[in-house]
Amino acid sequence: MNRDTDGWGLKDLLAAARDGENRAVARLLTLVERGGSPADEIAEATHLLSRDAHIVGITGAPGSGKSTITSAVATHLIEEGHHPAVVAVDPSSPLTGGAILGDRVRMESATASGVFVRSFATRGHSGGLSVAVPGVIRVLDACGFGPIVIETVGVGQVEVDVAAMADTTVVVVTPGWGDAVQANKAGLLEVGDIFVVNKADRLGAEDARRDLELMLDLSEISGLDAGLRPPICKTIATSSEGISQLIVAIHDHNRLLRLGKGLMESRKNRVISEIRARLTHRVAEEIDRALEGERLDSSISPVLAAEQIVGGLFRK
């Protein structure tokens, strides 16, 4: 194998990480985040080392308390005897492209309890989150962490990418979040396995719960509900109220997945999502390379130019 920039052989680095050395784990995740051939080597090395960790995605609008819930959930899992890890998908700095690390600040209590926490930038990986996050999951799973909790920024394509990688997706809302129609527009119905009304001590918490119940009722009437009705939990994450009930719901969903074909389908979809992302990235690189090498004729329309480039790519 090649050697990384610190002089460690990747084989030795992986062995140290699997022996419980968190510095080696962190180094592997840095290489995965950077992308390129070292990340590909790590993906190959960890492909068959899965320990079957449960992957939990926590998503919701910014300010809904996802980080606080994630911290409380991870701490509770430690107390239950699990070895959880948290991947906090942070917004990227507009200057450096790195993670702003806001989630890391809010997870100090979880870190102090022994939870492995890694912040991850939404931008900067050569293949995007849909390539990088599965690599991170593989490393953490191979190193014995589980459950693995992915907490997202709560906006845009990141949610779609991460929901495709989770076995159980927890959607967090707050009082005043909007009605059931808006929820459907936001796609929450499709991604949520468990719903959480956080900040349940605030005015409007019961209205938020009612809106979620209405949304689920409408899905059953329209025939969109293909499985069990997702539970709705109420939490006050700052005081850990309701977190134990949320943990029970997460464990229950994991058991249901393992009783049927749900877990197998989840893992299959994760692999398909990553393969699609890698193919998309490789094709995009080839297109960029073709555009850089082309002297575009202004007399040719963009439609014809695109057709010529595509034809050239697939004739190779």
Image (cartoon, rainbow, N blue to C red):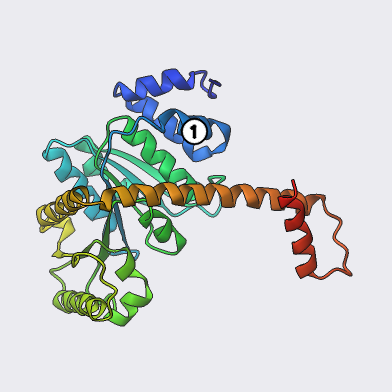
Residue 299 position by quadrant: bottom right
- In the rendered image, which quarter is residue 308 located in? bottom right
* Residue 72 appearing in the image: no
- Residue sitting nearer the eye, 200 or 147: 147
Which of the pair 257/73 is nearer the observer? 257
Other-residue count near label 1 (Cα within 10 Å), few / some / many at <14 / 14–19 / ≥20: many
* Image quarter of the C terminus: top right
Q: Nearer the viewer, residue 40 or 75?
A: 40
The picture places residue 189, in percent across and down from the top left corner, at 30, 70
Q: Which three-letter amino acid code belongs to the residue tagged 1?
A: Leu
Q: Residue at x 33, y 34 (%)?
A: 50
Q: Is residue 73 left or right of residue 10?
A: left
Estimate the x, y position of residue 104 in percent, counting from the top left.
33, 46
Residue beneath label 1, please? Answer: 31
Where is residue 114 drawn, in percent x and y? 22, 34
Percent position (x, y) of residue 218? Answer: 24, 80
- Identify whether 26 is placed above or below 283: above
Instruction: Look at the numbered disc 1 and give the secondary structure of its residue.
Output: helix
Could you tell me how many numbered marks the image carries? 1
Vertical position of residue 229 compared to residue 29: above or below: below
Identified at 23% across, 65% down, the residue is 227
